[in-house]
Amino acid sequence: MNYHILKKDELDGFIKKLSNSMKVVAPVAKDAGNFAFQEVSGASEIALKYIPTILPPKKYFMPPREKMLDFDISGPQPVDKAVLDAPELAVFGVHTCDLAGIQCLNMVFSERPRDYNYLRRKEKIFLIGMECGDYCDDHASCALVNSHMPSGGYDLFFTDLGDRFIVHVNTHKAEEIVEEMGLAKAASADMTALEKIREHKRGAFRNEIGVDPRKLPEMFDKGAKSKVWEDVGHRCVACGNCTNVCPTCYCFDMADTINLDMKTGHRDRTWDSCQFETFAAVAGGENFREERADRQRHRYSRKFKFPLDRFYRFFCTGCGRCTRTCMADISLKDTLKTLAKETV
Ligand code: SF4
Ligand code: SF4
């Protein structure tokens, strides 16, 4: 067991030392009770207790817009040159729900054909997790999918023990950093304090949907024609906010921009959303999900049914962002509860 101790008053020094070798980003308080990951230079800027940030840390692995390549078609053979901006980066304070989201994306982008841009960025990112407490808002449903407890996917993981953090060291790179910083080994009293916190969490975090998660895929099979899809479909305004803020949504679009010389240009990748009307439109005028109700059912199925067949895990981490951000007040928890009532 590789656990170390960082005193609270040493956190500032820790962040500053880390910033000597890489950019450090962390959750920072914003207006109206919101939080966002952004660059920090010291501990005083960091929100150690926060509800899920507006955008998840996926924005560092897969930016909302990224240039993929430059091209030139002026010569006898078209030429293209890949472009990739992947700086060394430490992401500090990632909660377990967002670590679970990154684990989902890792699986998707490691499948063949592998996504070179994503994987290269991942290699350059040093992930520091932070244990959350029972201070999250009512929109979260992490206990349904068990993402409130740490299950790997980080380099270091911090748990607040009051005047100090106990730090789990999970990778070789993390071991080197901890050694360099000279962090003391955790004592058995620290391990007991950690176990107490985990014990408390197991009792405090509840699966409020009231359904055995193993029943979720079946619920979607039985509820394919449920009225709940019509209901949320009528209310949805197809803004795409819910997918943009979701830590596991990864759909993207590619577009080429041609310069005025009509010979050179570049290709950009941008986030896309299955909630947009044109998302499932194909050549010939067909649209497989023209109705908002169908698009909503699809979004939920992409979280609780389809990924089980392919990746053996849910692609919802229960972060609650889709509900928090929805302009039409569509609640993931309410939708699941309604579906459960009809089908279980
Ligand atoms: S579906 Fe909603 S609650 Fe689930 S991971 Fe995505 S944003 Fe979070
Ligand atoms: S955030 Fe709400 S209104 Fe916007 S697309 Fe998603 S469900 Fe529809």
Image (tube, helix red, strand yellow):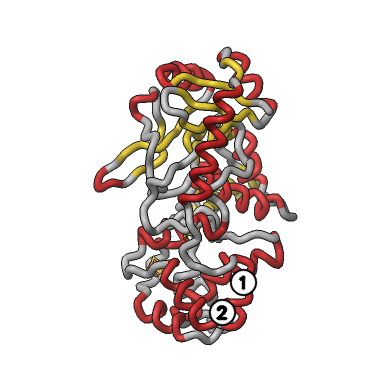
Residue on which the image places disc 2: 344
Label 1 lies in ligand 1 vicinity (Cβ under 8 Å): no
Is there any visible trace of residue 8 in the rendered image?
yes
> What percent of the width, then of the height, locates residue 248?
55, 56
Residue annotated with mark 1: 215
Residue shown at the point (61%, 80%) measured from the top left: 221
Where is residue 19 shown, x and y percent of the image? 48, 21
Residue sitting nearer the eye, 306 or 71 = 306
**Residue sitting at 44 percent across and 17 percent down?**
10
Circles 2 and 1 in contact, beta carbons < 8 Å: yes
**Disc 2: residue Cβ within 8 A of ligand 1's nearest atom:** no
Instruction: Tell which quarter ligand 2 is in.
Output: bottom left
Q: Is residue 39 left or right of residue 109?
A: left
**Looking at this view, is 228 or 263 the one in front?**
228
Q: Residues within 10 Å of mark 2 (few under 14, many from 20)?
A: few
Disc 2 secondary structure class: loop
